[in-house]
Each structure stands twice: as C-alpha cells, then as structure tokens.
Amino acid sequence: CKLGHLHLLSEDYHKSLSAYNKYHLLESEYWKDYPFLFGLGIVYYHFSAYSWTVKLFQQLLYNEPSFCKINEVHCRLGLVFKVTSNLESAVKRILHLIQVTLKKSSIFPVRFHLGHLYEIQGKYVAARGEYEQIIALPATQVKSFVQANTLRQLGWIHHTVESFGDAASRSATALQFLQRSIEIDRNNGQTWYFLGRYYSSMGKVHDAFVSYRQSIDKSEASADTWCSIGVLYQEQNQPMDALQAYICAVQLDRNHEAAWRDLAILYEACQQPRDALVCYLNAKHCAQVKNEVRSLRLAVFVQFSQNTKDEDLSRRIKLLQEQVGSSPNEHLNKGHILPCIEDAWTLPIPAELTQRQTREVGAQLRHHVPASSGVQGYPPVLQTTTSSHKLLPNGPATENGKLNYHHHQGALDGGARYNSVMDTPQDTPSSDVNPSLHTTTNPYQLQTKLTNHMHHHGGTNGSIVSIKPSPPLSHASRSSGADGVLSPTSASLDQRQSPIKEKKLMCNGSSPKHLHLDKCPPPSKPPSRKQTLPKEELSPPAPTIYLESKKEAMSRALADFCTNPQNPVTVIRGLAAALKLDLGLFSTKTLVESNPQCTVEVRTQAQQPSEENWDSNGTNKVWLCESSRSYSSIAKYAQYQAMTFQESMKVGMNRNTKRNTNQNTSGEKSSRGTSDASDPCSSKSTSKRKTFKTIKFGTNIDLSDEKKWKLQLQELSKLPWLFRLVSAGNMLSHVGHSILGMNTIQLYMKVPGSRTPGHQENNNYSAININIGPGDCEWFAVPEEYWGEICNLCEKHNINYLSGSWWPVLEDLYHANIPVYRFIQKPGDLVWLNAGTVHWVQAVGWCNNIAWNVGLVSPHQYQMTVERYEWNKFCGYKSIVPIVQLTWNMAQHVRITNPKLFNMMKTCMMRSLWQCQQMLDNLKKNNIDVIWHGRTDEEHSHYCETCEVELFNLLFVRRSESNLQTHLVHCLNCARNLNPDLENFVVLNQYHTDELMRIYDSFTL
Ligand SMILES: O=C(O)CCC(=O)C(=O)O
C-alpha cells in the first residue's frame, strides 16, 4: 500500500495501480485503510475508471467523512458525475464544495464547473449568474485559465441563447467575450472553435476559417472542428475539401452524428445517393446510440427537435433506399464528383491543416475505438442492389439539406464535447496529482483500456475491486495515524484545516459510527444469484388470499402469511366486503364533494403497454421512465378523469357501430391492429417509430389532514391491526411526527396507463395499497434479494436506482434471471408489499388507489430498515425515516420481547450514545459551549443541511449567509468542513445525557 502511495506521489500511475492491487488482494479489510481508498480512487480517476472511483470514494466518505482530503474527494466525485452525465449528483457535490471552500480562491474553478453544469442542463440564467460572479472579480484573484474558460462560455451562451436579448446585442456581447477569452489564453482550441462557429454564423467566412485553423492548431483532435470546417467548405462550394474534413471528423469520432449527416447531405448534393444512404444509415445509428443518453440529459425542447431530426432522417433514408433500389449499380457509379465513401475513408487529411493534427489523430485513433460502437466495419459498405431503375437526378439535398452546424452545439451537446471544457489539467481541483479527465475518450472506453492495461502489466485478472465481505471491523486495527500520508500530493483544498483542533475535535477515529449491526464493511449490494431459474419460476403466481369473513380478516394467520419473508407480495381479496368497508369514501365523486381544492401532483406520461417502456422518440425500449411534473386540484383532475372516460366510451361505441356496419355490408370482421384507438395502451407504429398518447396521472395526494379527511380515516380504522395506519405494533407510529405518505395516507387518481415507476419503499418498510376502482391496476413485483441486480441494471442504463425514475423492460429482467410477480389488483383488493419488495404499477382502467406504509415491530423489518438506512448514507441519499430517533422512541414506548430485535436496537442506542458522549467531551476540551435546546413534542428530526444524514441530539447551527433569518443545521463533520474551529456555529443539544442513559438502562427485554 505504501509503495502504491510512493508511485502515486511520483505520478507513476501504472506502478501505483499495480502496487495497490497487490495490497487489495492481500488485505481483506482494505476498506479500513483510508489513504488506500483515497490513493486507489485517485489512480482510477486518472485512468477515467469512474465507476470504480465512485465506489472507492463512497467507501471513504462513508467510513471517514472527516478524512483530511475529503474536499478533494467531493470535487472529484463532482467531476466524475459531471462527465458521466449524472448531473444532479454533480451539482450537489459541487454546491457542497462551494459551500465549504467559501471565499477561497480555489472556489472559482469549482464555480466554473457549477456554471457549466447549469449550462448543460439548459439553465442558462443560472449558468450566466455563476460565470458573471467569476469575471466580476479582479484578475489577480482568479487563475487565468478559469477566466478564459468562463469568458468563452459566456460568449457561447450569448451567441446561442435567444432569450438573452436581441440578436444584434447578443452577437456583439458574444464576440467581446470570445475575444477577451482569447486575449487571456491564445492556446485554447475550444475558444477558437467557438469563435469560428460565431464568425461562420455571421457569414464571415475568412475569419471563421482562420479561427478553425487556429483551433486545429491548438487543440487536441476535435471532430466538431473538422465537421464545422466541412460545413464551411461545403457552403463555399468546395465539395472535395468538405468531404475530406467530414471524413476527418468521423474518423476522429465514429459516432459523430452531425458529421455523418453532413456527409450524407454532401453526397446527395453531388448526386451520389448510394454513398449518401450509407452515411445517413450511420447517422441514424449514432442517433439511436445517443438517444437514450440524450433523453437523460437534455431538456424537453431539445428532445422535440431531436424527434423532428429523427423523422427527417428516416424519411431521407426511405427515399434514398427507393432510389438506390431502383437504379442499376453501374449507373450509380457514373460521373461521380466525389470518391465513394469507401475510398474517401482512406483519403489523407488536408495537408495544410494537419501538421500537428496528424500526430494527434494517430494517437487518438489508437485509443478511440468505442467499446460499444455499433457503427462497425469501416469503411462502411452498402449492399448494392441490381435493380435496373433510373437514378433520380438532383438529389433534394436542400429540402432538409441545412447543414448540421447546430446539431453539435459545442459545449451543450454530447458528453465528449463538454468534457473538453473541463479537461485542461488546471481545471481540476489539484494540479499536483494531475487528474486529467481525458477529452476524447469516453469513460467506458477507458475502463476497457484500463482493464487491458492490467492484463498486460501483471495486475489482477480484471477483478480490481472485487468487494467481498470481510471479517468484522476491529476497532484497534483501524489505521488512523496514516491519514496524512498523501498530504503533499494534494494540498490544494485543505490547507485551511487547522491540524491541532482537527485532532481535538475529531471524535470518530475509532468510534462505531454506523448502525451496521454486525460491524461489517461498508454496505454493498446483495451478491448476484448464480443459479438459473427454470422458465416457470421466472413468472411465479402472486400469493392471493380470498377472505370470506371478518374473523378471517382479523386472524393471526393472515398477518403471519403477509409478514412471512418468503412472500414478497400478497393480494388480499374480499377484505372490503368482509369488513363492510365503505370504499366509496375514496371515490372521485366523494373526493370532489369533500375537498375539491386539495392539491394533486400531476405527472404527464406516455400511455404504453405495461411490459414495455419506450424512449421519447418511440424508437428504443429503455428503462428511463420520463414524466414531467405539474400541479392541479382534485376537482380539476376529476374533470380530466371523467372526460377521458367519456371520450373512450364514445370511441368504443363508434367502433362498434362501424364494425356492425362493416359486418352488415361485407360480412367481414374488421381487423384489430396495434393502433386500435379504444385500446387504452395501444401504440401507433410508423416505420418502426412508436407514438403514444399523452396522459396525466394524479399522484401523491396528501390525506393527512384529520379534519378534512375525518370520515375516510375513520373508515380505515376498521382494518385489522397489521394494516392499520396507526397501531402500537407499527414502528412508524412511534416516529413522533408525520412522514407524508408513510404514516399518513396518500391517494392516487388514475386513467389507463398511469405509471408508478419501479422502487422499494422508503427505508424498506412494508406497504399497503387498496384499489378503490372502478378499473383495475396491474402490478409487477420482485423479491427484495434481487434489488442489487435491478440496481445494476439501472446503473447500466445510467439511472440512479434510488433517486431516478425507471420502468424495467421485462425481457431484461428475465434475461438476468430475475423472477417477477405480475398480477391484477381488482377494485377492493388490498396489496401487501413485504419489506423491501421492488415494485412498479400501471393502471389498466380508470381508478383511485390509497396507500401507506407499515413497519412491523419485528427483527426482520428492523434489520431491513437499518440496512437501507446505511445504504442510503453510503450513496448520499436521504433516509426520510430517522431511525436513530425512532429507535430511542421505541425503546421508551414499546415492550420488546424478541431478543434479536432487542439486541439490534440496543446496539443502535449504544452507538448513538457513545458518539454523543465523544462529541460532548471533545467540545468541552475545546471550550466550545453546548446550549440546551430540548425537543418539543412532534418536533421533526433534523438532517444535516449538507450531507443529509440524520442528526440525533447534537445540532451544529449557523445562520444562512443568504438569508440571515434562516438557520442551517449541520452534522459535526460538515460543520468542521465549513469551519474547522466551529466559529459562527452554535452547538445545541436536545437531550440530557442522564436522560439518555436512563432510557438506555431501562430498556430491557
Ligand atoms: O397505486 C400506485 O400507483 C402506487 C403504488 C405504490 O407504489 C405503492 O403503493 O407503494
């Protein structure tokens, strides 16, 4: 491990990786060695092996949030999330970093990234705000490369964002910014490229060309620049030069959609339809590859324009296929202006532009074979036909022949492009370890590269970080003294820490910080199951219970069946009848009569077949389940529900009349195609592109107000104890405050196709859902032990399992050997979801549902809850159930008789007590006062403003700088990160230690 550090210090990453690997193989408890986690994370970052970087840094953050280089960890995580398009997480990390590096000069590169993240997200005003803060500062305070990059981006957004003013003034401002940027840094190829784009759009051809040339000269090989040069040549009617430039672009980036399109347009203009067709097909493939990523990343309006682009593309391809198919082969080859695409592929790059370029292209191409590039087998070869039809003259290249300048909007488009904004080594947090995020190679390629490297350099056989369970953590063996080992390598962000106080205030060096009950390593996903399930076990029937009497409904046997971990989900039929429940109280009519103005969150969705999920273009099956959010009222949504229902009745009646007429006149039955309008989830399919009706789903309607919903709540108290909203045996009744939708009721109002995407319940609690009707709902459920595999599939689709919105493609699950319960919930059916069951739901008809959570006081439920609490902490995701507070409350109010549950709760209490005591001792030693605050009844638990962990007892409070009326609460680590000596903080405590000790002692079996 030390050897790894040494090589890292001398920036020999290969050797460092090799040494760290050896250590990792030998040391099963590697995760206790924080400098190792940091060092190896840095090495992976260097090689752009981002998923491994994230894993190691998360382990480090989880185990030692006060590690001396923790800000560097946050910064790199922010950049990793940025480059892997996990933009929300990136913004979160960068905002955190800005907060903790307040008023330091190191903030500005970070602030630049924040601005740029906003720009990528299409939040231009926010982006401009960040950029303007940077350039408003005296030049001496901001490094010149940050200034230059900021001016460049400001120039670019003024040039491209129409809402920033009238064209003339935007244009003047854009030019000023770009020129100022170049004055500061003449060697930035990206800035020259933007300037070229600017001049080109102003019709200043010569200036544009000079700028592009500068760009080529200064930059690494850039497909964008070559593509734009091609456009410029083509506009000047120099097709051969244009061809060469485009070829250069697609050689540099085989997935450069715009360059393939432009090349196609060029060939069409030169009446070479066969070559044009090849290029369009490649463009189409690139578009497909990009679509899924794009829909994750870009704002809706960009998707609309993408849809139009895709339609154009498909139309052109169809036209050309007809042309090519109907023309003799030899005819197609006659009178070419340009070499065909296969020959063009071998053309040399224009000599005048390439002295420096050729060197780089060679180097690039060696590394630049995309791991999953579907545009294979270059040069592209078209299967020619031998049909004898005549080639149409004058390919209509100008109909959609606008060249694709705007399809590649520099910093705003694809991932590879925006990397270049940040990859100047100085842009990264600390230049001393030179963590370059390579411009031209995507993370996945580099992962492959890295793996190959490891094969060749005698590393492991690819299993670099095989996270395996290790023996329990021994406190004594924690390597605490070695934290400083790497300090000299990355001093940038941490110089401000005061080492003396740091040691004094640290209280968690050897204390058990987490609730992890058996002191195991950082949380990890359950291992994948190896055994292959027989086909019939992949679709098990959902356990269903038919109740006939109140006695059965109230029986112990029913509760035991539902809570048995062997049954991930149970459908209970006949409950409403057995208990004489009046579910009509939740019908739309009654809801409108009782609370018409109540707020409804509306999700606008596409109505799709339940086992499928298509991207917004209707071209690929994807996991990302998009919906936009708005708000309405019960009364308005009810109108919508009724209106859609009536419409569908009308369509149904018309269809019947038509069918009858047809049958009567011709005696034939009308065929039922996929576009059957009365089928609520039907899709129309034109040239393989599906289109779906847009629907609105009324969700998360809050029925917590006991006055407004008195009758409804009363009715539900007739339920058996296990299903009741409030009961002594329900952990969630002991939280001490309401958690909306968990220990309060939520209502859903649906039309056919309304989707609740895949999820596990918060903190793995069990859930109850009753369908009020009149229509059915379709459910999909997967046992808890498979959540890790579903999480992996989400990651594969670039979706965050915890915070993202996903709808599993069923065939992907079967392919991964994951069993899925699929069943219909009829009106009156109660669905019980056991702890941790993964599920997703789609309405078949028009219906309302009510749902809430239950936490059975049992060891199984408690363990599942704690596991998810820790996993959430590991992933930086907030647990909305404050488990520590809940445990202390339960210890006071519930008689626990199960020894396993008792031990787990006692461990949790002991750890929180121990931590509080350590903090108090250290605060006292440092003469920091702790002020009594207490806790009011029903006071909500506090969470750290920065890292969102639950705070128990001790609160570190400061005034918000932006709003002095607001107080912000932090955990000790984040407070110290903001100010090592806790200046400007007030420390409050909510419990007397004596009282906690008394509760602890009197909590007995
Ligand atoms: O009825 C719905 O769509 C919500 C289903 C659900 O996820 C739940 O009740 O937990």
Image (cartoon, rainbow, N blue to C red):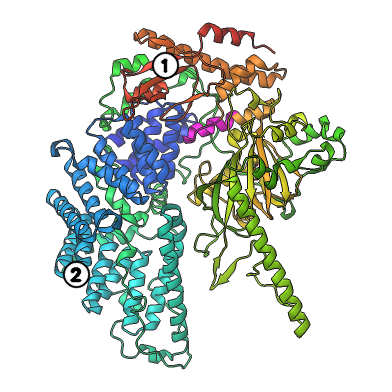
Q: How far is the residue under mark 1 from the one under mark 2? A: 65 Å
The residue stretch that appears in magenta: 866-880
The extreme left residue here reads 183
Left or right for 246, reference 195: right
In the image, residue 51 lies at what x, y percent?
A: 44, 44
The numbered disc on residue 507 is 1
In this picture, is 319 found above or below 53?
A: below
Pick the residue in front: 116 or 528: 116
- Counting residues from the start of the chain, the first of labels 1 and 2 encountered is 2
Residue under label 2: 203
Left or right for 240, reference 768: left
In the image, residue 860 lies at what x, y percent?
A: 68, 29
Left or right for 857, reference 937: right
Disc 2, SS: loop
Pick the residue in front: 769 or 775: 775
In the image, residue 576 lies at what x, y percent?
A: 79, 40
The extreme front residue here reads 593
In this picture, is 504 found above or below 852?
A: above
In this picture, is 686 found above or below 862?
A: below
Q: Of the residues shown, which amino acid type is indicated by label 2?
A: Gly
Q: Of the residues shown, which amino acid type is indicated by label 1?
A: Cys
